Image (tube, grey):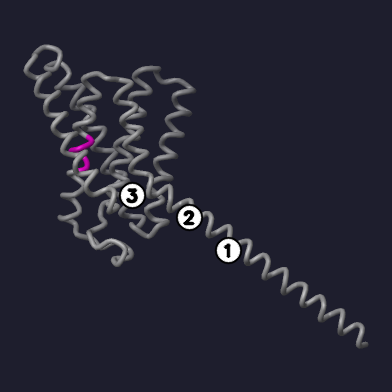
């Protein structure tokens, strides 16, 4: 009888140790996953800027200049919307500025749309470009979701930011195709305005990024 009780006690102890080990493993896994998400979130703005820069250098045409100026205006639009909507972040102690819409998600999906349009314009719409476009959209969605996982934005703030960025990108590209392209080809002064305007926009935004991005996350 004592042997049976000892066996039960040993089994209980073994189960307890097993649960403790499992908890430690799961905790370590969760911590590693959370650390990776936090790192990717902090790098997201630089990755998006790098991708946009690569696409810009690859295209190096009037539409790329137009898209670059649009990206700066898109960022400015996000700041304006934040002030108008003035909605708190889910954890206001992390960031004190308004969270609606997510400027990260807005910039990410502006860039996502520009990448997809560039891909289709150069290689046509086929099975390969459709798969790559879906992958780009999925990656953009993941980087946007990181803002929710880090409690910097609510799901609705990220969703609105993504929708605004996507819509503004579509509008800006449509404006180029419908109105600006013809004037850009026909008139030198239009080319100068777009080139000089884009340069001034980008330099101003670069100065802003160097000043604030290193210290804050928007």
> What residue is at 21 percent from the left and 40 percent from the top?
74
Determine which of the numbered discs, if any, sits on residue 78 in the image.
none
The correct choice, above or below, for 121 with respect to 201 in the image is: above
> Marks 3/1: CA distance?
30 Å
| Mark with earlier residue (3, 2) | 2
Neighbor class of circle 1 (other Cα within 10 Å; few <14, some 14-19, many 20+) is few
x, y percentage for residue 57?
30, 23
Q: In this view, does 47 lie to the left or right of 103?
A: right
Residue shown at 9% from the left, 14% from the top: 188
Depicted 134 relative to depicted 1: above or below: above
Query: Pointer 2: what residue?
Result: 35
Closest to the observer, 112 or 18: 18
Residue at x 30% of width, y 67% of height? 93
Residue 155 position, x and y percent, is 36, 55
Q: Is residue 72 magenta?
A: yes
- The part of the chain drawn in magenta is 71-75
Locate the N terminus and report the quarter of the image it occupies: bottom right
Q: Is the magenta region chiefly helix, strand or loop?
A: helix
> Which class describes the residues within 10 Å of circle 2: few (<14), some (14-19), or many (20+)?
few
């Amino acid at each position: 009888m004592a042997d049976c009780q000892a066996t039960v006690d040993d089994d209980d102890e073994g189960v307890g140790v097993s649960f403790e080990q499992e908890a430690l493993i799961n905790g370590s896994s969760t911590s590693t996953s959370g650390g990776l998400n936090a790192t990717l979130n902090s790098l997201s703005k630089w990755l998006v800027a790098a991708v946009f820069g690569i696409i810009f250098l690859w295209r190096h045409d009037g539409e790329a200049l137009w898209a670059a100026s649009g990206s700066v205006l898109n960022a400015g639009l996000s700041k304006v919307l934040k002030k108008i909507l003035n909605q708190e972040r889910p954890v206001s102690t992390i960031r004190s500025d308004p969270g609606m819409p997510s400027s990260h998600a807005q910039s990410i999906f502006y860039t996502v749309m520009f990448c997809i349009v560039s891909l289709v314009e150069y290689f046509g719409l086929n099975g390969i470009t459709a798969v790559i476009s879906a992958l780009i959209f999925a990656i953009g969605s993941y980087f946007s979701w990181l803002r929710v996982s880090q409690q910097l934005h609510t799901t609705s703030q990220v969703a609105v930011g993504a929708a605004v960025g996507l819509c503004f990108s579509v509008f800006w590209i449509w404006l180029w195709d419908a109105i600006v392209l013809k004037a850009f080809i026909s008139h030198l002064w239009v080319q100068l305005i777009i080139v000089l305007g884009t340069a001034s926009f980008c330099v101003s935004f670069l100065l802003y990024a160097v000043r604030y991005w290193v210290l804050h996350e928007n």
